[in-house]
Image: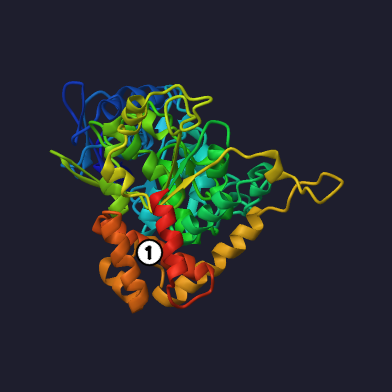
Amino acid sequence: MIFIYCSIKSAGILGIEPYIVNIEADISNGLPYFNMVGLLASEVREARERVRSALKNINQAIPMGRVVINLSPADLRKEGTGFDLPIAIALLCTMHQFNEGIFDDTLVIGELGLDGEIKPVKGILPIVNMAKKNGIYKFVIPYDNQNEGKLIDGVKIVSFRHLKEVVNYYCNGDTITDDLETCSEQCYNKGEVLSDSDDYSQIYGQESVKRAVVIAVSGFHNLLMVGPPGVGKSMLASRIPSVMPLMSMDERIEVSGIHSICGLLDGGRLVEKRPFSSPHHTITSAGLIGGGRIPRPGEITIAHKGVLFLDELPEFHPNVIDALRQPLEEGVVKIFRTGGSYVFPADCLFVAAMNPCRCGYYPDRNRCNCSETDVKRYLSRISGPILDRFDLSIQVPRVSLENMYDSGDKKGLLKNHLTSKEMKMMISRAMEVQRERQGCTKNGKLSIDEIRKYCTIDVECSDFMKEAYEKLNMSMRGYHKVLKVSRTIADLDGKETIGIDHLSEALAYRLG
C-alpha cells in the first residue's frame, strides 16, 4: 500500500498565548517504528499510545511500518493533550481514509481516550480567537468544548464525542446537529445579576470605608483595610466587583480566554462579572504571580480586569508579598526562562486586609495582650515598598449599635446607608469624567507626564503639599499617589480643579 504525507493544523499554548502547530504524519515501509519529534512534553509523547489504541478500537489500526509524527515549529515546547485528535486524523489521512486536502483550512484539537472518546481540553476560546485572526475559520473540537468555541462569531465549529463520529462525518457524510457558524444565545450570559448577598446594603455602619471603596474603584487605586476581626473587611472587599463597571466585549473575551487556559471557564460561557481572586495565605510566589518550570499564570493574572484580594496580609510569606512590587506598578508579570520570556497581564485592583496585631485588637488594651515588640514584629512582615504601593489605607472600626440604628425612630429601623447601586452610580459618573478628560487611562494609572497635565494644583495647594511632603517624610511615589487620589476625589465631587479639601482627604487615606 502506498501512503501519502499529511499535515493537519492544530494549536498549542505558550504561557497564555496560543500559536499554530502543524502536525505532519508520514508512514513508510520498513520495520515497525513509531516516533514523535518536535520538542514534546511527556504528555504529548504519550499521545502515541492513546492514538494507537483509539485507532485500533475503531477498526483503523496503524499498518506495520515506519511512522513518524512531527510537530512544528520544532523550537517551541509542545504541552497538553490536545494534539491526540489531530495526530489520529493525520494518520488516517496518510492511510487514505479521508480525501486529500479536506482538512487544509481546518484547525483540529482534542484529547483521545483509548476507546476513541474525544475529551475536552483547556484553552479552546483563545485558540479559536487566535486562529480566526490568522485566517482559519473551520474547527474540529471536542463536543464538551462546543459552547466555548462558538463564543467567537464568524467561525464554523464542528464538535464530536467520538473518533468514529469524525470518520463517519467526513467519509460517509453523516450529519450532526451542532454544525453551526454562529454562537447560539445560550453561550452568553444574559447580563450581570447580583444577589442581595453581593450588595453593600447588607453592610451597616461602615460608611467611611464604603467611601474609600468608591474612591478606590473610581480611580483604580490600591486599597488597604486595617481593623480588628469581625468588623467586615472581607465582606467589604468581596462586594467590590458589584460596584465596578461592566466589562466591554473585548475585556470579556480577554478575561474568558485566561480563565479558559486555567480551566476556570464555567460552562463554556463568557465571564460577565469582573474576576475576584482571594488566594489563601499559604500560596507560593509562583501561585500568586505565575511561574514554575513551565510558566503558568498566577492568581494576579486570573484577577486581570478585576480584584486581587489578600486577606490577612501579614500572614503571607514576605517574599510572596514582595513579588507583587513590579506587577503592581507595570500591570504585567514578566517571567524569564532559558527557553524564552513570558508576559502575563496583571491589570487588577489590589485590595488587602489585615489586623493591627496578631491577636487583632491593638490598641484596645482591654483585649490586646501583644507587647509593642510583638506588634512591630507582626507589622514588619509587610515591607515598606509594598505599603508604599497602596494608594489608600483606611481603618475599619468596630461598629457600635448606635451607629447602626436610627435613635430618632421609635420603630428601631436601621439607618440609611450606601447600597451597591448608589455606589456604582457615583463611580460611573467619576469614570465618565476621567474618560472625557484623559481617555481610557484611570487616575490610578497616570504616568508622571500625565500627572503634571491632569493633576495640576494652584499655589495655595502647592504650598500645602510642600509642607505635607516635608513633615510626613513622603517618598516621591507617595507624593504622586496623593495627587492621583485627590484627582479622583475631585472627580467624585464634580470639581474640575483639585482643592485643599481633596488633598487633605487623600493625605488622610495615605496615612491610614
For residue 14, above or below residue 439: above
Placement of the N terminus among the 4 image quadrants: top left
Q: Residues within 10 Å of mark 1 (few under 14, many from 20)?
A: many
Q: Give the image location of residue 42, x and y in percent.
A: 26, 25
- The quarter of the picture where residue 299 lies is top left
Disc 1 target residue: 484
Residue at left offset 68%, top offset 53%: 417
User: In the displayed structure, does residue 489 sit left or right of residue 26?
Assistant: right
User: In the displayed structure, does residue 460 sit left or right of residue 168?
Assistant: left
Q: Give the image location of residue 211, x and y in percent.
A: 55, 55
Residue at left offset 51%, top offset 46%: 148
Q: Amino acid at mark 1?
A: Lys
In the rendered image, is residue 264 in sight? Answer: yes
For residue 476, above or below residue 459: above
How are the residues colored?
rainbow
Q: Give the image location of residue 83, x and y in percent.
A: 33, 36
SS for tag 1? helix
Residue at left offset 20%, top offset 21%: 32
